[in-house]
Amino acid sequence: MSQTVTATRVLSYLEDGKTLRSWLLTTDHKRIAILYALSITVFFFIGGTAAALIRYNLVTPQGALPSAETYNRLFTMHGVIMVWFFLVPAAPVTIGNFIIPLMIGARDLAFPKINLMSWYLFMAGGACALYALFAGGVDTGWTFYAPLSSNYAQGHVVAVVAGIFISGFSTIATGLNFVVTIHRLRAPGLTWYRLPVFIWSFYATSVIFLLATPVLAITLILLSFERIFHVGVFDPRIGGDPLLFQHMFWFYSHPAVYIMVLPGMGIVSQIIPCFSRKELFGYKFVVWCSVAIAVIGFFVWGHHMFVSGQSPYASIVFSLLSYFVAVPSAIKVFNWLGTMHKGRIHFNAPMIYALGFVGLFTSGGLTGLFLAALAADVHLHDTYFVIAHFHFIMVGGMVSAYFAALHFWWPKITGRMYPETIARGAALLMFLGFNFTFLPQYILGYLGMPRRYHSYPPEFQVLNVLSSAGASILAVAYVLPLFYLGWSLFRGERAPRNPWRATGLEWTTDSPPITRNFLVVPTVTSGPYDYADPHTKLADV
Amino acid sequence: MSENVAPHTHFQYEDARHQADSAIAGMWLFLATEVLFFGGLILAWIFCRHWNPEGFAAGAKESVLWIGTVNLALLITSSFVYGLGQAAIEAGRVRMLIWCCLLTAGIGVVFLGLKLLEWHVDLDENLWPAGPFKLHGAEADGGRLFWIFYFVATGLHAVHMLVGIVAVCWIALRARRAEFTADWHTPVTVVGLYWSFVDMVWIVLYPLIYVVGRLS
Amino acid sequence: MRHLLWMWLALVALGACAFGGAFLPLPAGLRPLLMLPSLVMVAILALGFMEVRRGGALPGAFALAAIFWLFVLLGLGSADPLTRRVYPADQGGASVPGPPEISPQR
């Protein structure tokens, strides 16, 4: 509970201050979410352009780009931007920042000024990394393995690493804010087991932010030391261990992939019940599976190092633990399916994206099981099978979920409805383009095509051309929303408070909400998925 | 719900106590991230020592024990002094708080001064890990690894100390502006947590640097 | 204030123990035990000066989480070096026999 808001402050957050200063110095979580959304959209398209150039190169076996060096720098740029400046922040800082306080009945996050500072840190880190990447970049891959990155690579390693380091502070600040907010600012009556799964998922994500990112920070510092002074703890020439780098790097980077996907799971856990008009199946299972994923996800990082020279005994332990971590994800998939079973399903755009998430995430997740098997991984490591695996989860899964969230909460955020038919078309086009792009890559990997190679044997060309063709379809699907969502800002139908008749406190506020979110802070008395009758039709929109 | 709220309470909180507890929880959470940050460094120590036991210990023997130990005593005392300051403001004694803050910051400055002296001595002894190195032969490599760890660890710790000194001075400044009372002094507590943590880090680094490798 | 003084004295005493450990000839495998006085000092700081149990359940929960995750990092991270078999690098000439020749058959 917080203090009441007097009736005079009833401007929507979009109208409450129209100067640039009121945006750049805002402490309103909703405005900060918008600032972030604009930034990460820019990063998404920069990273996407790098991907387009990669797929262009791979259309011919000898490589269409002038040099292998350029190709190496491109895939590094693609990875660095997409991981640290799009996927890791995206859902938490845009959807999370906007929705979390609304969903728990709070007027803002616990530390609004730290929230604003996190955006500036993100921009500073991004500027640093972008400058370095455009000034020639690095060719080490986003994984920066020593001793290549510390001793032999040409390029701006320290500058890129500095950008990533700075952005890490941004994510730590965000995670800190979310955890304290969820603990301390819930509305009266909102007990832990009445929280939507979305909140549990973002809480779990924040735990990973907080505990994994610092290890990345120290890793990057040690790497920079070695690069600058030409001597370091990863250098085998003085008895250092290159695998130490990999252990420290993956201790962060494996949980980081759960940072990337857990928000998506939370998002679809809101969307599927709403568009099935049915409560989430097995709420407590989904909740504790989210926590389990975050925790067990810290125990499996060695599965990236099966062929690195790591002890086989350690590898066996990591392989076993990797099989354990798959279980909670699988349980959640069954829960989503159980939610839809005997529900009344409406195929609005958010639902299409959410269903795409479920299918593509499952496919990617299953292929993770092959990779977790030691013997299979010897063959599959560093092939396109791995690339397909993580793109199915990250792009097929998480990007779909991000688009699902954008569409689902668009009426709340902007006060406008997007055009449903085009949106459905874009969602289906994305699903089609995605499969076209990445299904061939499973086969390529199985056949042995290595990743990070600018050229390949001619017998792989057909599959590569298919993949590149799919990428062009995917690109269209990504660009379409820019147009119709942008259009909706000016010409879209005005949104009511709750266009989807969804449950959740955010839907009790105006669309868009007033600056302080609630005139009177609500008191919660029921569970988070109180969809009474599965045969209640959604209002026609 | 009352419209009269304490001047420092922000609108999303019920009352001052709610906000204070949230700020303290937030600082503890931040300190948890710092545990993992220095934890990574400790993992590096474990690896380097494991693969090069003799050289690593040989490098450790060159560390200047008396400076490290004096610094340990200084930091322990500084936490005590700041704690006195906290107790003082809980009793409403602002002047005592200011003196304790200044003394704490002063101890911090002495710590950093001794650290600079120590680094100077180390560099004079050719213990900088890059370039001509004091140890030769079989022990040189492990020795270099130790001194890489040493400079990174003490350098990062010093940066944290500097931030802490600035924070403590900021508290003293705010206290002088009569911002703290017996009822409300959350920033004092929050900065105290950070300062004690920086102390903790030195307490853990001390044996890693000065003790474990000294005799073999 | 009295309890602060006692804690300070305890810390100084433990600090002296830590310092003393520098002169204790323990075998290399046991030397990490010399960390023990420091770990007790950390506990005194957390419980005494930082009063981790004050301010509700949250600070304690965060502190315990940090310690648990530190153990995972250090413990599971050490599993590799502790169990890795090192094959000495060949200094020239095959002193260690390589894998058996596999005759190519297609």
Image: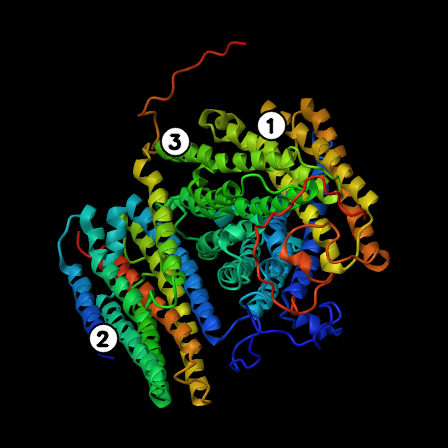
Residue B166 on image: x %, y %: 43, 77
Q: Residue at x 24, y 75 (%)?
A: C4
Q: Which mark is in front, 1 or 3?
A: 3
What is the chain letter for disc 3?
A
Q: Earlier in the sequence, mark 1 or mark 3?
A: 3
- Circle 2 — which element? helix
Residue A143 in sight from this viewpoint = no
Closer to the camera in the image, C103 or A343: A343
Q: Which mark is residue A236?
A: none
Q: Which mark is in front, 3 or 2?
A: 2
User: Mark 2 sits on what residue?
Assistant: C3
Q: Amino acid at mark 3?
A: Ile
Local packing at callout 3 (Cα closer than 10 Å; few below 14, some 14-19, many 20+) is some
Q: Which mark is in front, 1 or 2?
A: 2
Q: Amino acid at mark 2?
A: His
User: Mark 3 sits on what residue?
Assistant: A316
Local packing at callout 1 (Cα closer than 10 Å; few below 14, some 14-19, many 20+) is many
User: Mark 1 sits on what residue?
Assistant: A445
Say if labels 1 and 3 share a chain: yes
Closer to the camera in the image, A127 or A113: A113
Q: Residue at x 37, y 70 (%)?
A: B193
What is the chain letter for disc 2?
C
Residue A26 on image: x %, y %: 65, 71
Q: Amino acid at mark 1?
A: Gly
